[in-house]
Amino acid sequence: MEGMFYNVNGGFVEGIVRGYRNTLLTAQNYSNLTQCESIDDVKLQLGPAYGDTLAALPPNPSTSSLANKTTEKLVADFRYLQAQATGSLAKFMEYLTYGYMIDNVALLITGTLHERDTRELLERCHPLGWFETLPVLCVATNIEELYNSVLIETPLAPYFKGSLSHQDLDELNIEIVRNTLYKNYLEDFYHFVNNHPDMRGTPTAEVMSGVLEFEADRRAINITINSFGTELSKSERQKLYPQFGKLYPEGSLMLSRADDIESVGLAVSGVGDYKSFFDQMNQSGGVGAGNMAGGSANEGKSLEDLFYQKEMELSKLVFTHQFTHAVIYAWVKLREQEIRNITWIAECIAQNQKDRIGNYITVF
């Protein structure tokens, strides 16, 4: 009887998510957006998909206000789904929020170090990473108090224990802290989807294993590239790699020894997609932030662009499977990319750089 309820609940929520997918912007919607002359025009075009969410925006709003409001819509839809979920599905959705929690805690640590205003810090926290005791962290008067609060008061406590001490929470180590937490989180999430009785051997385990392996590999590659020219040693770098993925263990070992972009490309060459990324990147001339972060139309795709593109391909494939919690994960990723696209188009319009406006990542 319990299993029947689980299936009914999972199928009900999955049905809602598949309905949400149909509200994602279409190719025609994007075509209309690229013809807009002002942010008000963008608001008008987004009306059918985002409803009353954008109504409170003032005339010709800032691009950041537009991004915040579209994010609010994502969060509201996610929280509605979360309210319907029970059992392993409810826990699965909790796991989806942990990455945002890690970013929020890292933001608060950085703000505490710099004695930033508490209200400003909380306003900058991502709402999907909000938890009941998050404001408690802002009461800490020093790093040791904040560390102790994190261990006691937050869902991230298991990812700190045994991996980090309060001495690690300083300005030089904040990215190491963030990446250590993500490593522990991804490994825990991977173990959860492959070992929970409701998911072991199911499409959810199969599909989520694939998307989490991609995320683990992406983080290992980015950590390696971002460590060049820093004080991070090769042994410390290796400790930050998740211990699973298509690159693990041989590719991970080669990444830990890499000294430049060429050696990173060699380390990942055993995985066809990643080899293709570096081949394309070499042809376009760099690993920069890419079009989605401000590259010009003739710069070609950066490594970041190619990762986003692959993430969208994986997310779209999830919807070809039935009876899997993974559709919620995929829907969130697709919506986040849609918001990045909207923000990118709005920024191009605001800066009157319409020659760059088409450089968004396709969703559907």
Image (cartoon, rainbow, N blue to C red):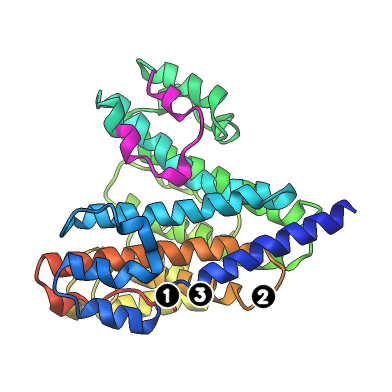
Q: Quadrant of residue 168?
A: top left
**Considering only order in the chain, which callout, 1 or 2, is on the residue closer to the N terminus?**
2
Question: In which quadrant of the rendered image does the C terminus lie?
Answer: bottom left
- Chain part drawn in magenta: 121-139
Image spot of residue 154 (x, y percent): 54, 30
Q: Can you identify the residue that label 1 sits on?
A: 363
- Report x, y in % for residue 212: 57, 60
Q: Nearer the viewer, residue 81 or 237?
A: 81
Task: State the residue position of label 3.
Answer: 22
- Element on which disc 1 rests: loop
Residue under the image location 72 percent in, 64 percent down: 11
Query: Is residue 111 among what the camera can see?
Result: yes
Dot 3 falls on a residue whose secondary structure is loop
- Answer with mark 1 or mark 3, whichever residue precedes in sequence: 3
Q: Look at mark 2 in the image and give the residue it sits on.
A: 321
Quarter of the view holding residue 41: bottom left
Q: Residue furthest right?
A: 1
The Cα–Cα distance between marks 1 and 3, rounded to whole angstroms, is 12 Å
Name the amino acid type tagged 2: His
**In front here: 220 or 357?**
357
